[in-house]
Amino acid sequence: MSASCRRVGSCACGAVRFTLSDAPVDVIACHCETCRRWSGYLWGALRVPRHDISITGDTLRWWHASAAASRGFCTDCGSSLFFDKQEASYIGVAPGALDDSTGLMTTAHICIAEAGDYEAIAADVPQAAGPDTPRGNKR
Ligand SMILES: [Zn+2]
Ligand SMILES: [Zn+2]
């Protein structure tokens, strides 16, 4: 089985659609305060190389939470869809927005120092207190 493949997805109302020409299967779960507030719980992302994603939809807006990163969402339905860190080679894409998320796996938790105490974090998945992805996160 390939470690990556083509996938498509959309926001909840369908106005914003995207295609990933070569999507990874690893989901990185971020527990930072901004992700918690923005998503309502925690926010997970596939890290998709910039040249492997195409996005359509007039209702997509970007919220600049900081100078370093912005977050893409649909203004009609409010779906939290994308995370764009200025200096990264990838765009974070919400796995929950995919039409078919079969085969994906959460392989790391980051920013757990800011996690809510209601969050269940699997003990066998590598964790990091801060934003850097923990080493050895490949199963
Ligand atoms: Zn929408
Ligand atoms: Zn975060």
Image: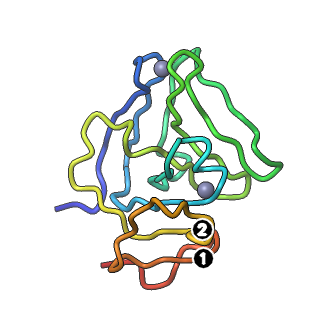
**Residue 111, percent from left and from top:** 60, 68
User: What is the total number of numbered labels drawn onto the structure image?
Assistant: 2
**Would residue 89 be seen by someone viewing this image from the given angle?**
no
Rendered residue at 65%/55% (across/down): 33
Furthest-right residue in view? 67
Pointer 1 with pointer 2, Cβ within 8 A: yes
Task: Establish whether ligand 2 lies closer than 8 Å to the Cβ of label 1.
Answer: no
Compared to residue 61, the image places residue 109 above or below, namely below
User: What colour scheme was applied to this rendering of the protein?
Assistant: rainbow
**Residue 10, percent from left and from top:** 40, 28
Furthest-front residue in view? 117
Circle 1: residue type: Ala
Q: Nearer the viewer, residue 73 or 8?
A: 73
Marks 1 and 2, how far apart at CA: 5 Å
Q: Quadrant of the C terminus?
A: bottom left
Where residue 139 is drawn, which disc sits there?
Answer: none
Rendered residue at 44%/31% (across/down): 18
**Residue 48, percent from left and from top:** 48, 52
Task: Establish whether ligand 2 lies closer than 8 Å to the Cβ of label 2.
Answer: yes
> Label 1's element?
loop
Q: Residues within 10 Å of mark 2 (few under 14, many from 20)?
A: some
Q: Quadrant of the N terminus?
A: bottom left
Circle 2: residue type: Cys
Q: Where does label 2 land, which residue?
A: 111
Q: Nearer the viewer, residue 80 or 59?
A: 80
